[in-house]
Amino acid sequence: MADLFDKFQPLIDQYEALRGSGLRDPFHLQMDEIKSPTRAVVNGREIILVGTYNYMGMTFDPDVIAAGKKALEEFGSGTTGSRVLNGTYQGHAECEAALREFYAMDHAMVFSTGYQANLGLMSVMAGRGEYIVLDADSHASIYDGCAMGNADIVRFRHNSVSDLEKRLNRLPAEAGKLVVLEGVYSMVGDIAPLKEMVAVAKAAGAMIVVDEAHAMGFFGENGRGVFEAAGVEDDVDFVVGTFSKSVGTVGGFVVSNHPKFDILRLVTRPYVYTASLPPAVVACAATSIRKLMSAHHKRAHLWQASRKMHADLRGAGFELGTAEAESAIIAVKMPDQQTSAAMWTALIEEGVYVNMVPPQATPGFNLLRCSLCAEHSNEDVAEIVARFVRAGQAVGLPVSA
């Protein structure tokens, strides 16, 4: 009898080899204490967090915490129901109101996770005889949402305006089309050329979704994302986002100006058939979103810190995923998985946590991924770079201070 786990054997072998190498397991690190958005305790030692996506440092904001405590006391620990049944509380409505104000859009719909927001939207927006056109490097949640639906899926080369245009021009002119883009791509932190891509999509008669999960909070004058910074707010039909990055809690959302948007509440399965977020979570999210509207100083500092760290790591000899800092994500390329794991372990020993990206997420190359926080000081950035250099030298990389 065939073992249904046999198809995973190559990955199992790879993982077992990593665990048997004597290096730390990068995928099961336990954080025993979280002291701030930038500090944690692991095995009794304090480490600097440089891989949490906590871009704006809102997880310990006193107003956010106070709102969560108040909601927990007044509304209990959970809703025990879907948004379309008993799971819409005052806090869920308030959270959607905060999103409408933040994005200056007419409609907002909160999901239990960002993953479910993409899963829900992609699975229902296009059906048989219609097309979803997406970047080849799209997030897994986008691909999974497409797999749930019945539309034909067309991929174009990552960030290639010309390939997007070519593939759109091959589709029937009368067919419904949805173009899916991301403001910031999370593997290497590069941004999409949204101005050009949106123009191409509109010329082909397509509707447009932009996932701003990794851009909300610090791109654009109001922190709305790359689509705001690119000046295409009036041409984007849907914006998808998450609360688990800059907002500092958990959940997902879709915002839009489309007049028929609310029908999605009845046809989107990951919304209809999932318990809604706990009252404390939506209270935290609403408070955080409203504070992000005026977080101009945080945005400015995060950009300054990201550019500084990117330049200093490049200057030390590290190979990075982008030529310059395009976002708060800084991807450090490694020559192979063994070196990647060794470097990750050396960084933990130096007191720095980054993400070692699982090999299946980045076919063809190995990455250590950093994400800076607005709460990282200039001194933190200098210390992180110094520890990177020491760790790199310890594993034999050609780097120097």
Image (cartoon, rainbow, N blue to C red):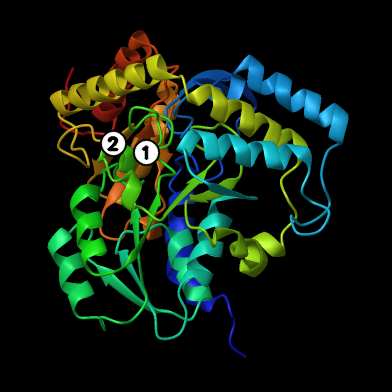
Please state the horizontal and vertical placement of residue 238, each as a whole percent of the image. 44, 54
Report helix, strand or loop for mark 2: helix
Mark 1 sits on what residue? 225
Q: Quadrant of the C terminus?
A: top left
Q: Tell me if 225 is positioned left or right of 197 in this view.
A: right
Secondary structure under the numbered disc 1 in the rendered image: loop
Q: CB under 8 Å between callouts 1 and 2?
A: yes
Q: Where is residue 250 in the image (x, y as percent from the top left)?
A: 61, 41
Q: Badge 2 is on which residue?
A: 229
Residue 304 in the image: above or below residue 249 = above
Residue drawn at (33%, 38%), measured in percent from left and top? 228
Can the viewer see residue 148?
A: yes
**Residue 212 position within the rendered picture, expressed as x and y whole percent measured from the top left:** 41, 45
Badge 2: residue crowd in 10 Å (few <14, some 14–19, many ≥20): some
Q: How many marks?
A: 2
Residue at position x 34%, y 16% in the image: 301
Q: Could you classify mark 1 by the number of other residues whose Cα lies within 10 Å: few (under 14), some (14-19), or many (20 or more)?
A: many
Q: Which amino acid, mark 2?
A: Ala
Q: Residue sitting at 23 percent across and 69 percent down?
A: 204
Asked if one can make out residue 44 in the rendered structure from this viewpoint, the answer is no
Q: Which amino acid does label 1 sit on?
A: Gly
